[in-house]
Amino acid sequence: MKKKFSRIYQFNITLKNIKPPVWRRIQVPETFTFWDLHVAIQDVMGWFDSHLHQFKINEPLSSAKVEIGIPDEQDDYYEILPGWKQKIADYFSPDN
């Protein structure tokens, strides 16, 4: 059987301001979108997806900060890219 992806990304997720530290390590395929990553984090933390989420990350070509999550059509102040359209492989290189 042929694999549908060639790269695995590993993320260490640590909750801020919690003592003792609460963390999880997950591995996801390069085909994942940020929405898929969000769902994986919800699962591994045992959460029930009851709050909005957002990823803030540098855009690979310009290093400008972008926000990825669930766009709010009522908010014209700043753009949130839809997480289900943004592949994690487009934002992370094999070196980082």
Image (cartoon, rainbow, N blue to C red):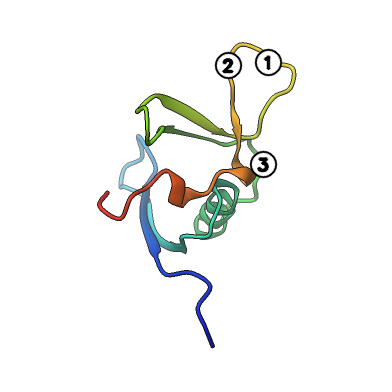
Whole-number angstrom distance, CA of label 3 to CA of label 1: 21 Å
- Front: mark 2 or 3: 2
Q: Amino acid at mark 1?
A: Asp
Picture coordinates of residue 48 (x, y %)? 65, 50
- Front: mark 3 or 1: 1
Q: Amino acid at mark 2?
A: Tyr
In the image: residue 80, left or right of residue 21: right
Q: Residue at x 52, y 83 (%)?
A: 2
Question: What crowding class fits label 3: few (fewer than 14 Cα within 10 Å), some (14-19), or many (20 or more)?
Answer: few
- Please name whichever residue, 49 or 84, is drawn nearer the observer in this view of the structure: 84
Q: Does dot 2 land on a helix, a strand or a loop?
A: loop
**Which residue position holds label 2?**
78
Q: Does dot 1 land on a helix, a strand or a loop?
A: loop
- Residue 65 in which image quadrant: top left
Mark 1 and 2 residues: CB-CB less than 8 Å, in contact? yes
Q: Amino acid at mark 3?
A: Ser
Tell which residue pokes out farthest to the right in this image.
Answer: 74
**Which residue position holds label 3?**
50
Whole-number angstrom distance, CA of label 2 to CA of label 3: 23 Å
Picture coordinates of residue 58 (x, y %)? 38, 32
Tell which residue pokes out farthest to the bottom in this image.
Answer: 1
**Which residue position holds label 1?**
75
